Amino acid sequence: MRVTAIAVVPPPSAADLPGVAPELLASVLARYSRSNDGLAAILSKVDPAAPDASIDRILRFVDYGHASIGGLTGGLAVAVDGVSLWLAYKFFELSQMADGQESSTRYITLGADALPPPAELGIPGDLEARWLAVMKAAFAAYKTEYARLDALASAEPSRLRLPQNAGGAVRARLLKNYALDRARYFIPFAAKTNVALVQSARMWAQTLQCLASLPNPEARAAAALVRAELLKLSPRLMRHSLAEPSAVAQAESELAASCRMGLERLSSAPLPDETWVRVARETPPFLRETQPVGDALKSRANRYGRQGLATRRARVTFAFNNIALAELRDLNRHRTGHRWSPLIQAGFYLPPEIPREPHAALLREQAELTRELLRRGSPAYVHSLLLGAQTPFEHGTHADKFIYEAELRTGLGAHFRYAEHMSAALRLFCEQLPEARHWITEGTAEPE
């Protein structure tokens, strides 16, 4: 695992813009809230030769809360290379105010060399050989199915929804996507990927506090490495990034609940789709909603357009009983509201193009390994899962954010499977808010 922190400073051409370290920026803006002198006057009191003394002088004598100060540091960019797909998922789950990117299984071919050593993941010593055998067999199935589907798509391009007049480069990319999008369900959740996030010191401290409080050794190791890098940029605020009793207690509670639910529902059979949506539009009697839903949506030119109060105030909770981890990784990155999944295997999804029978032994062995880890209450059970594992997932947000997500995840280039999930959720949403249907652009996920 390798961590790199990036400090953003004004470009050389912007000579009139003051360049300050993140904590100096935070302290200056904190002082700004206790003064009406203006920013220039506050900056004039900062000694460029001794910025640390200036920071300490401001923060020592004013009763600022560390969280409000941490949010003023601007975006601190951190890249973490060589983490498991599970840990990348946790980074996005915990960093709900961050912007970020992750290496995509839709464009990158992976191999067994992407497996970290089992000890780094907390795999019990007596199960290491068994775990490695299952993971390598999963990668072998991934490689076999990718090669088969790639050849099939090349021989029968009519299987793909290619755009009209697609050039050679576009055609080649979509052929590759067709195979990768369907073979990726065999990729282990333990496989290594890269993730980069940009967020304030406040949110980094919160993220690292939660990671350090998890029982998973990989999470704790990552928290320590990221903290070491961020100490170079924000040494005072990172002292709030250590494990904390309430976070530890909640992590233990969630692990116990996941293990119980996982043992009750563990299965390698495909789970039928079940989608649940609730829309709540109740408003206080002294702030009644007066805008028609159509007026909130009709002025948009596309999904990025501003929506009105009618949808911005409506609450939406939607959930799937069976979303595969492959798709959950994308839907988990929508930042608003609260997202939760127990990360269990209540079924195993394979697309229609992949026959189950040739892989029955692998799926059986993988499920039994997961069962043993769940029985032991081991947090490492997540590293026995493959991306085809189907798990429940719930997201609570507002209608404007839900509409944006539904249009994005059914639109041009969307993965076929999460387009199916979001189309089902959108259908139920429109049953409860029928006035919105005419103004929502549901895509067909074309091309692949």
Image (cartoon, rainbow, N blue to C red):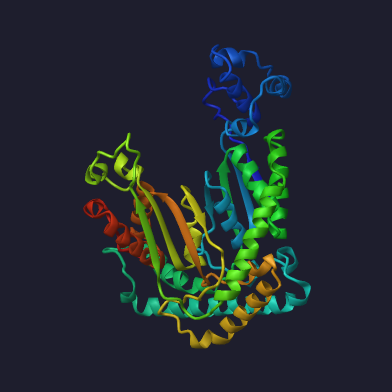
In this view, the residue in front, 93 or 189, is 93
Marker count (numbered): 0
361, 294: nearer the viewer: 294
Q: Is residue 343 above or below residue 358?
A: above
Answer yes or no: is residue 231 visible: no
Give the residue at the far right of this rendering: 125
Q: Is residue 391 visible?
A: yes
Left or right: residue 148 compared with residue 280? right
* Image-quadrant location for residue 39: top right
Q: In the image, what residue occupies the spot 43% across and 67% down?
A: 177
The x and y percentages for residue 70 are 62, 34
Give above or below for 327 relative to 360: above
Residue 232: name its quadrant.
Answer: top right
Q: Residue 257, how many percent across, how many down?
A: 61, 64
Q: Which image quarter holds the C terminus?
A: bottom left
Residue 259 placement (x, y as % from top left): 63, 69
Asked if 232 appears above or below 226 in the picture, the reply is: above
Of the pair 97 and 184, the residue shown nearer to us: 97
Question: The N terminus lies in which quarter of the figure?
Answer: bottom right
Q: Nearer the viewer, residue 401 or 101?
A: 401
Query: Which residue is drawn at the image coordinates 62% and 47% (left, top)?
Result: 207
Residue 80: % across, % down:
63, 52
Q: Residue furthest front?
A: 285
Query: Residue at 60% of width from left, 16% of height from top?
Result: 43
